[in-house]
Image (cartoon, grey):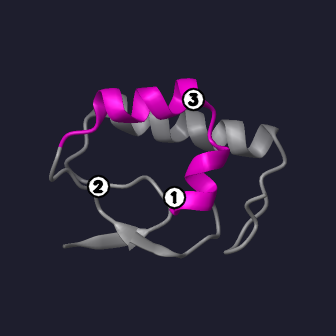
Amino acid sequence: MSQHMCSWPGCGVPVDDALWGCKPHWRRIPGHLKARVWQHYRPGQTVTTASPQYLRVYVEIETWIKANGGGSGPGTAA
């Protein structure tokens, strides 16, 4: 299985390519954004092969994190 780092800014915890991020950070994402991640996820995709819609969801999540005081680094999830 391939891995990438958790998508939460500054986290750096390795996760499977099929996952957005580590469990603590994924749990902090609102349900409507999680649903959009799964709506646009395609098995086997990478950052370079992901659809524009999937990449837009990443930007939406980053915007949400910044607007909601998201910390950085491992262990910042509440």
Q: Name the residue that disc number 2 marks.
A: 18
CB atoms of marks 2 and 1 within 8 Å: no
Question: Taking 78 as reference, is 33 left or right?
Answer: left
Rendered residue at 40%/35% (across/down): 37
Question: Taking 44 as reference, is 28 left or right?
Answer: right
Q: Name the residue that disc number 3 marks.
A: 31
Q: Name the residue that disc number 1 marks.
A: 7
* Figure quadrant of the C terminus: bottom right
Q: Amino acid at mark 3?
A: Gly
Rendered residue at 61%/48% (across/down): 27
Q: Amino acid at mark 2?
A: Ala
Q: Amino acid at mark 1?
A: Ser
Q: Mark 1 or mark 3, which has the lower sequence index?
A: 1
The segment highlighted magenta reads 22-42
- Alpha carbons under labels 3 and 2: distance apart: 18 Å
Residue 75's x, y, as percent? 72, 73
Rendered residue at 50%/65% (across/down): 6
Q: Is residue 8 visible?
A: no
